[in-house]
Image: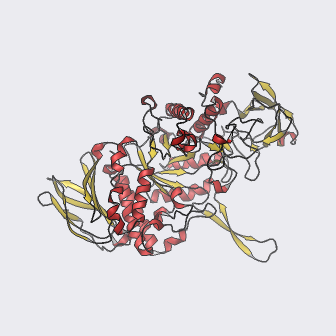
Amino acid sequence: MDFYGFYRGNEFQAYHYLGAHREGEETIFRTFAPNAKAIMVIGDFNQWTETPMHKTYDGNFWECAIKNAEPGMKYKYRIYDQNGRCLDRCDPYGNFMELRPHNASILWDMKKFSFTDSKWMKKRSDHKNKPLNIYELHAGSWRCRQETNKEKRGEGEDLAWHWYTYAQLGERLIPYLKENHYHYIEVMPLSEHPSDASWGYQISNFFSPTSRYGTPDDLKYFVNQCHEENIGVIMDFVPVHFAVDDYALWRYDGTALYEYPNNDVGRSEWGSCNFMHSRGEVRSFLQSAANYWLEEFHFDGIRMDAISNLIYWQGNPARGENKSAVQFLQDMNRGLKKRHPSAMLIAEDSTARPKITAPVLEGGLGFDYKWDMGWMNDTLSYFQSSPQQRRERYHKLTFSMQYYYQENYLLPFSHDESVHGKATILQKMNGGYEGKFPQARALYLYMYAHPGKKLNFMGNEFGQLREWDEKREQDWDILRYPNHDAFHRFMRDLNQIYEEYPALSEKDYEREGFQWLDCHQEERCIYAFKRQAGDQKILAIFNFSDETQEHYTLAVSDIQKLKLLISSNRDIYGGTEILPAQEIPVDCGQAEFSLPPFSGAYYLMLSLGI
């Protein structure tokens, strides 16, 4: 390891040196703990008695060699602080851990698994000029096993949910993704975490895949299987904060080593510890962790959580920019792209800071994509409002294109929009049960026509009504009901069209790829725009009012006819049209429509002579 680079915050492979590694006939244990008085290794290999570690290099690193420490054995570091107090710690750079509530690290041979995904790795890209349709999921609650547990007293039975392993998840998930035309998944954090309720966002070990679903090799197998079926895998990564458990990073060597020494900036809004990004050792730790998932597990990208809390102190612009954290992001992203040019770096950022997706050399942060939180909030607010209110809020749906080309935006309907009393996407639609479906179909038709890559949380695609709960699987049995089954079919067909027609994605970040055709129908709540790539042009037209809009005419120059690609009002999707007009003629540059309530449609625009 480059020790100077480690202290400067330039190291991306600290995990090759720190942690536990088999070298010849010995396992070498190494940890960074500059303020510890003494450190002992305890584990299965020494019957949990103390084997002393000694200082090495500059006295800030500790190591020891143990011959009979084999893969699969558990271990901890017993760290004595300067006052003689000790705590048993998991290895910050450990590759595997026990299932909570236990917290020992587990030795693992990271070289044992062999990937067979070279074809995928060579051809993968950042999808800037391709469709990118991401299915976000929580690995433990997409689907679960249900088993009957007899109560201890034998007086009754209850049903308990159990996780699928990584392999079992892949067996069920991959065919579903292919059938529904999703070609990327984003998995909520898989780094080891103590509380299921944190969903993986409060992490105890940044280098250990959670044992909830299997071993590190099992996770590699899952990613490899996805790649062999042409499905990319993105993982959530949390570079802002960490869990407060005293067996992990908190006051690791008896002092605030990874975190700030005071709570004013040291505690996050989630009650966790904020990383101190001004320290080079912390930057090297986090950069190495990000690189680890891309390098060792072949993830195709990382989505970085809560970036606004890095850009500004405590995420509050009024407190000013955290210049050290911003520099960290720039250095990390530049280093990751140098090592993994085709991997995606995605920012969850709700700030108005410019150049999130601009190159670092141009003063940007170097992300490939930024979640468009403004689009998400404005769009959902619009659809939650009554048809009467939509006239007044008409331009909530036009505003996004006023700022859109400032960043490379990704449109998210994520897990955050289906929890904490916010209601699921379908439930957010205005009105009663039956009336929510046509609005949700029109909403998604609008989303997939709007420039920007797409992300949809599990369950949204079949109209989940119950808010997401990490303790149980999604309500798959709801597909027995015709409204939900038809909605699911609509989403599947919409995904296929998005995938097959370049006009909907190829020019996402070029102004020529989008043009408003009509965005001043405030009283009628009609919107029309064109997507274009090469010679292919697609008209997207919407009526978001609760009334049929008869005799609506639209100017479409140099077009002979419009060929219907998809209508959200088809009866097969739960709408009222049994067989909508498959073609609409254009007369003297004018096309006339009758637009049903809460509906939308895509038309292929066929030019003269075609």
Q: In the drawing, does residue 154 fall left or right of residue 18?
A: right
* Image location of residue 547, percent across then percent down: 29, 72
Is residue 510 shown above or below 518? above
The image's colouring method is secondary structure
Q: Horizontal and vertical percent for residue 179? A: 45, 59
Q: Quadrant of the N terminus?
A: top right
Residue drawn at the location 43% of the way across and 67% of the way down: 429
Seen from this angle, which residue lies furthest front?
A: 318
**Is 167 or 327 nearer to us in this picture?**
327
Identity of the residue drawn at 27% across and 70% down? 580
Position of residue 592 measured from the top left corner of the image (x, y, whole percent):
18, 65
- 394 or 31: nearer the viewer: 394
Tell me the quarter of the picture where residue 40 sits.
top right
Q: Is residue 441 left or right of residue 345?
A: left
Q: How many marks?
A: 0
Residue 561 in view of the camera: yes
Q: Is residue 300 visible in this depiction of the protein?
A: no
Does residue 554 lie above or below 17 as drawn?
A: below
